Amino acid sequence: MGWLKQWQRGPIMTIIVAWVACTGAILTIFFLAEARSAERAMQEIGFRLGPGAAAPRIDWLGALPQIVAYYILLVLLPPLVLWLLWRRARTA
Protein backbone atom coordinates (compact mmCIF):
# COMPACT_ATOMS: atom_id res chain seq x y z
CA MET A 1 0.00 0.00 0.00
CA GLY A 2 2.96 2.29 -0.43
CA TRP A 3 1.47 3.74 -3.59
CA LEU A 4 -1.65 4.74 -1.68
CA LYS A 5 0.38 6.72 0.85
CA GLN A 6 1.61 9.05 -1.90
CA TRP A 7 -1.88 10.17 -2.92
CA GLN A 8 -3.05 13.57 -1.73
CA ARG A 9 -6.48 14.31 -0.28
CA GLY A 10 -7.83 15.96 -3.46
CA PRO A 11 -7.50 13.02 -5.84
CA ILE A 12 -8.84 10.55 -3.26
CA MET A 13 -11.91 12.71 -2.61
CA THR A 14 -12.42 13.19 -6.36
CA ILE A 15 -12.39 9.43 -6.91
CA ILE A 16 -14.80 8.91 -4.01
CA VAL A 17 -17.25 11.58 -5.17
CA ALA A 18 -17.09 10.35 -8.77
CA TRP A 19 -17.68 6.75 -7.65
CA VAL A 20 -20.70 7.67 -5.54
CA ALA A 21 -22.20 9.88 -8.25
CA CYS A 22 -21.67 7.48 -11.14
CA THR A 23 -22.59 4.21 -9.46
CA GLY A 24 -25.54 5.86 -7.73
CA ALA A 25 -26.85 7.16 -11.05
CA ILE A 26 -26.30 3.83 -12.81
CA LEU A 27 -27.99 1.87 -10.02
CA THR A 28 -30.93 4.30 -9.96
CA ILE A 29 -31.40 4.01 -13.73
CA PHE A 30 -31.22 0.22 -13.44
CA PHE A 31 -33.86 0.09 -10.71
CA LEU A 32 -36.16 2.45 -12.61
CA ALA A 33 -35.84 0.33 -15.76
CA GLU A 34 -36.53 -2.85 -13.79
CA ALA A 35 -39.55 -1.25 -12.12
CA ARG A 36 -41.03 -0.19 -15.45
CA SER A 37 -40.41 -3.64 -16.89
CA ALA A 38 -42.06 -5.32 -13.90
CA GLU A 39 -45.07 -2.98 -14.11
CA ARG A 40 -45.49 -3.75 -17.81
CA ALA A 41 -45.24 -7.48 -17.13
CA MET A 42 -47.87 -7.23 -14.39
CA GLN A 43 -50.21 -5.28 -16.69
CA GLU A 44 -49.76 -7.90 -19.40
CA ILE A 45 -50.57 -10.66 -16.92
CA GLY A 46 -53.67 -8.74 -15.87
CA PHE A 47 -54.79 -8.40 -19.48
CA ARG A 48 -54.30 -12.13 -20.07
CA LEU A 49 -56.31 -13.06 -16.98
CA GLY A 50 -59.26 -11.08 -18.24
CA PRO A 51 -61.31 -8.11 -17.07
CA GLY A 52 -62.77 -9.92 -14.04
CA ALA A 53 -59.36 -10.67 -12.48
CA ALA A 54 -57.93 -8.39 -9.85
CA ALA A 55 -54.95 -6.41 -11.05
CA PRO A 56 -51.72 -7.90 -9.73
CA ARG A 57 -49.69 -5.57 -7.56
CA ILE A 58 -45.97 -5.32 -6.86
CA ASP A 59 -44.95 -4.68 -3.26
CA TRP A 60 -42.27 -1.98 -3.73
CA LEU A 61 -42.17 -1.27 -0.01
CA GLY A 62 -41.25 -4.90 0.64
CA ALA A 63 -38.35 -4.59 -1.82
CA LEU A 64 -37.04 -1.42 -0.18
CA PRO A 65 -34.62 -3.15 2.26
CA GLN A 66 -33.00 -5.03 -0.61
CA ILE A 67 -32.69 -1.86 -2.70
CA VAL A 68 -31.11 0.01 0.22
CA ALA A 69 -28.71 -2.90 0.73
CA TYR A 70 -27.66 -2.69 -2.94
CA TYR A 71 -26.96 1.02 -2.57
CA ILE A 72 -24.90 0.44 0.58
CA LEU A 73 -22.90 -2.44 -0.92
CA LEU A 74 -22.30 -1.02 -4.38
CA VAL A 75 -22.33 2.75 -3.91
CA LEU A 76 -21.13 3.50 -0.38
CA LEU A 77 -18.95 0.58 0.74
CA PRO A 78 -16.16 0.71 -1.92
CA PRO A 79 -15.37 4.43 -1.40
CA LEU A 80 -15.50 3.94 2.36
CA VAL A 81 -12.98 1.09 2.13
CA LEU A 82 -10.74 3.19 -0.14
CA TRP A 83 -10.88 6.12 2.28
CA LEU A 84 -10.09 3.88 5.29
CA LEU A 85 -7.17 2.26 3.47
CA TRP A 86 -5.86 5.68 2.44
CA ARG A 87 -6.09 6.98 6.03
CA ARG A 88 -4.30 3.90 7.32
CA ALA A 89 -1.55 4.25 4.70
CA ARG A 90 -1.08 7.94 5.55
CA THR A 91 -0.69 7.27 9.29
CA ALA A 92 1.63 4.29 8.80
Image (cartoon, rainbow, N blue to C red):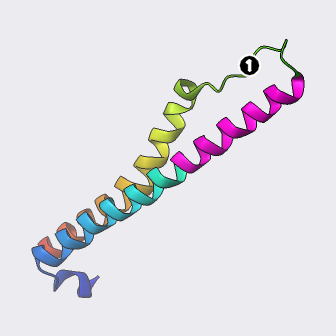
Mark 1 residue element: loop
Q: Is residue 49 left or right of residue 87?
A: right
Q: Is residue 47 left or right of residue 90?
A: right
Mark 1 is on which residue type?
Ala
As for residue 90 lying within the magenta part, the answer is no
Q: Which residue is mark 1?
A: 55
Eyeballing the image, is 26 above or below 32?
below
Residue 79, horizontal then vertical, whole percent: 31, 62
Residue 11, percent from left and from top: 17, 78
Q: Which residues are magenta?
A: 32-49
**For residue 68, which quarter of the picture?**
top left
Count of labels shown?
1
Q: Position of residue 59 (x, y in %)?
A: 61, 24
Please, is residue 58 above or below residue 80 in the view? above
Q: Nearer the viewer, residue 33 or 1?
A: 33
Q: Position of residue 81 (x, y in %)?
A: 32, 62
| Residue at the (82%, 28%) spot, across then down | 47
Q: Nearer the viewer, residue 43 or 91?
A: 43
Q: Is residue 40 magenta?
A: yes
Q: Quadrant of the N terminus?
A: bottom left
Quadrant containing the C terminus is bottom left
For label 1, the crowd category at 10 Å Cα-Cα, with few meaning under 14, some 14 to 19 and many 20 or more, is: some
Which residue is found at the position 26% from the left and 72% from the top? 15
Measured along the vertical axis of the image, is residue 45 above or below residue 57?
below
